[in-house]
Amino acid sequence: MPKVSAPTPPSPPQAHVLAAQKSFTGASSTMRPHLRSAPFVADERRSGRGAISNPTGRFETLDSIDTDDGWGVLETLPAFKTQTIIERPRTIITRNDSPDIPFDRSLNPYRGCEHGCVYCFARPTHAYMGHSAGLDFETKLYIKEGAAQLLERECAKPGYTPKTLALGTNTDPYQPLERQHRITRSVLETLDRLSHPVTIVTKSALVTRDIDILSSMAKRGLVKVALSITTLNRSLARAMEPRASTPQRRIEAIAQLANAGVPTMVMVAPIIPALTDAEMDQILETAAGAGALEAGYVLLRLPLDVDTIFSEWLLRHAPDKYRHVMSLIRSMREGKHYDAQFGKRMVGSGPYAAMIARRFQLTCQRLGLTQGRSRLRTDLFQPPTPKGQQLSLLSLFADEPSTAHECADITEGNKPCDNTPKRKQKINHSRQSGRN
């Protein structure tokens, strides 16, 4: 009888992946076809990164997996380095009608995020660019060049109604790239000039660099800054959000902003059951002591590829807590790892979620932290002047220029304009209607 060799057992990292797959896909993998796992990337190739694998994007038809062919090629693969790609979008303001969030428009200066938070709900968006939600999300970063100019152009459109614009809703506007490219600062300069209200959410102490702009806007009731803190445990933060500012630096940033008169909020986000939820009260107390005026929280969200990436990370860094964490998540998500229903996706449901909500409420009451959303001013908005149009409605009452040269003085670009009185009044009337 021929000898049949036993199959080679998987290496420990791959065993973790298989165990994770079995746990979060359940009996039938067809229920979650978007979940793809890949072999863990060697530690030396992912130093300072959050994800431990780089699974193929969910829209790709072919999987790409690094495999050792016996010649030691895996040992020579280069480390994942940050790559920047210039993106020139046609528009910059993103609209939404979600009842779960207190804004209907947002702006993200960057696509992808070098902070590398393993739980980031924005990771799946990288699949739209043909990339992985794993290490690609942290290393292949898009810079939206000209964001400030696009913002000004959109604000100048007839009929534009100013409402609070949110920065940092998808990826962090103060991630390490901002130190060099300053896209977020240019956007703030535009908003300051237009007196347009804005809120900022970040995990970076770099936000204090722009205190000069933020304090100026704060005096007019135009800005609020939220610092997101998941844990005060520096070691845990280093593993979970490797390139974000340390928790202590974020607390110091709250203090600096508060001392500069900038309304500051602390976001306990995300709350991870059985891993970070015990720290909620301490985070709120520390932030309130630093000067935070408001507070909010969000439960851990695991949409699409984030389910795989977070589960892999949890198995690597806290294997003894894996079953407990995932069991509690399912108890708050109606037996699933994620529930995208409005009203539930941010805070969950069930007894454990209700307990967290009650703890948060009582702690905020004790510390005097406001749970409501303070409103920023919109009545100060000054729309920009579109190119090619007169600078002010007051020109209606000015004497008509007698030559094309004189007409060029009140237009942009020193181009001759039509100095017909009827044409001029028509242009200004349309602008006045748009402003109202």
Image (cartoon, rainbow, N blue to C red):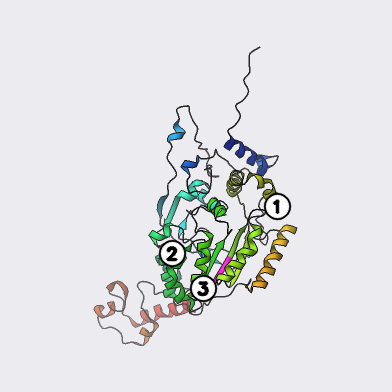
Q: Which secondary structure dominates the residues rendered in magenta?
A: strand
Circle nearer the N terminus (3, 1): 3
Q: Residue at x 46, y 75 (%)?
A: 215
Across and down, in percent, residue 32 comes to: 64, 44
Drawn side of residue 128 relative to residue 302, left or right: left
Residue that mark 1 sits on:
328
All told, the count of numbered labels is: 3
Disc number at residue 184?
A: 2
Amino acid of disc 2: Thr
Left or right: 382 as drawn, with respect to 272: left
Secondary structure state at the residue bearing disc 1 = helix
Comparing marks 3 and 1, which lies closer to the viewer? 3
Q: Nearer the viewer, mark 1 or mark 2?
A: 1
Q: Is 12 rendered above or below residue 307?
A: above
Judged left or right of residue 261, residue 373 is: right
Q: Which span is picked out in magenta? A: 262-266
Examine the image and state in which quarter residue 392 appears: bottom left
Q: Quadrant of residue 348?
A: bottom right
Say which label, 3 or 2, has the lower sequence index.
2
Q: Is residue 397 left or right of residue 69?
A: left
Characterize the local packing of mark 2: few (<14), some (14-19) or many (20 or more) Cα atoms within 10 angstroms. Answer: many
Task: Report the disc number at residue 114.
Answer: none
In the rendered image, which quarter contains the N terminus?
top right
User: Which residue is identified by label 3?
Assistant: 258
Tell me if mark 3 has few (under 14), some (14-19) or many (20+) residues whose alpha carbon lies within 10 angstroms of its own.
Answer: some
